[in-house]
Image (cartoon, coloured by chain):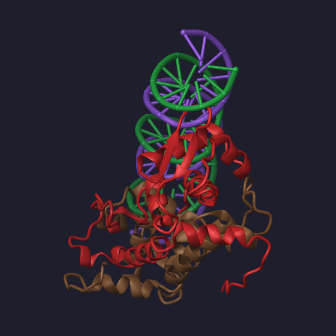
Chain colours: A brown, B red, C purple, D green
Amino acid sequence: MKFSKKSEYGLRALLELCETYGGRVLQRHEIADRQNIPVEFLEQILLALKRAGLLASRRGIRGGYSLIKSPEEITLGQVIRILDGPLAPISCVSKTAYQKCSDCPYATKASCPLQEAMGEVRDAIANILDHYTLSRFALSKQAEGSYVHHDRS
Amino acid sequence: MKFSKKSEYGLRALLELCETYGGRVLQRHEIADRQNIPVEFLEQILLALKRAGLLASRRGIRGGYSLIKSPEEITLGQVIRILDGPLAPISCVSKTAYQKCSDCPYATKASCPLQEAMGEVRDAIANILDHYTLSRFALSKQAEGSYVHHDRS
DNA sequence: AAAATTCTTGAGCAACTCACTAGACAAAAT
DNA sequence: ATTTTGTCTAGTGAGTTGCTCAAGAATTTT
């Protein structure tokens, strides 16, 4: 039940790109250096995000990557779905990539106990991630050093 | 971001075992047949649940498995953690199996934007699964056929 | 006691995924 | 033309997933 490094790196890369949003482009090695990510691997991630329409790029000597959507329009959910696939913990409760489970003995959706529970989980995850924007995400980076209290029960 | 078949099978098996709780034992092939699970694989799962103290077993001709804790005392979260490991989407926000991420460039826990977001996700997942008991889980099996309305936004 | 039935343990394995690497190529600036 | 960047495709080693197999130990029935 984990997110991949791809998603993690992708989000950390977008963090950097948020900072220069509207300004200059960032080169892959700049992002890789600052965020401690293997540069060739990062590239695949940036390209996936580009294909998905979040990034633009320019080749050549003053080339690099830049955000083309505003950080307020991009949610963590979108990014993770691009890089990691659907959020749902089992595919039969996915709304973006539903697939009937092959071996489930329950005939109807409503009668499967797993679907009820997992559906709740899916909704909870999506609710957070689909409302968490990059702008909010990048905010906590700027607040570096400050301590925010959390109730970590 | 998926749960494994192990967890899925494990939960489905427990569903069957809930029904005979307090009564007779169930043999592995009974569970496997009803829930459509490969029997040898199921066995590994049942044994893991036994080692974790949820199940008892008896060998020999009238042998089988049975629940030894009441369905109200067992949560989906417990089961999934036994079979799949920690719930947290990245290990640096796990409460049951915390691990510092090796390549994270942020010095303090509070300053990592990923931790803030992922911590929320972890809490949401745990909140549902650690309060969802097997008794409630098994309930929706009995209601087979009946349709329960859900707001699936 | 012997035989049948069931759980128990451990090993093995094919297929897949993850995290990354390499290399050839294309475009842009100097 | 050359250098500097991004683009694309393929490959790869390690680890995980989802199972299978086989030998053994306990329990009951005969």
Where is residue B61? Give x, y as percent.
62, 32
Q: Which residue is more in the foreground, B16 or D4?
A: B16
Q: Quadrant of residue A106?
A: bottom right
Residue B59, compared with residue A20, is above or below; it is above
Where is residue B102? Give x, y as percent.
28, 57
Q: Tell me what residue is drawn at x 25 percent, y 78 percent.
A: B110
**Residue A117 in the figure: left or right of residue B47:** right
Q: Quadrant of residue A98?
A: bottom right
Q: Tell me what residue is drawn at x 48 percent, y 54 percent.
A: B68
Q: Count all numbered tags in the image, as a single digit.
A: 0
Q: Is residue B48 something that shows in the picture?
A: yes
Q: Which residue is more in the foreground, A107 or B151?
A: A107
Residue A84, compared with residue D12, is above or below; it is below
Q: Which residue is more in the foreground, A55 or A85?
A: A85
Q: Is residue A23 something that shows in the picture?
A: no
Q: Which quadrant: the C terminus of chain B?
A: bottom right
Where is residue B147? Give x, y as percent.
77, 79
**Residue B51 in the figure: left or right of residue B143:** left
**Residue A91 in the figure: left or right of residue D1:** right
Q: Quadrant of residue B17?
A: bottom right
Q: Tell me what residue is drawn at x 44 percent, y 58 percent.
A: B81
Q: Tell me what residue is drawn at x 48 percent, y 59 percent.
A: B79
Where is residue C26? Give x, y as percent.
61, 58
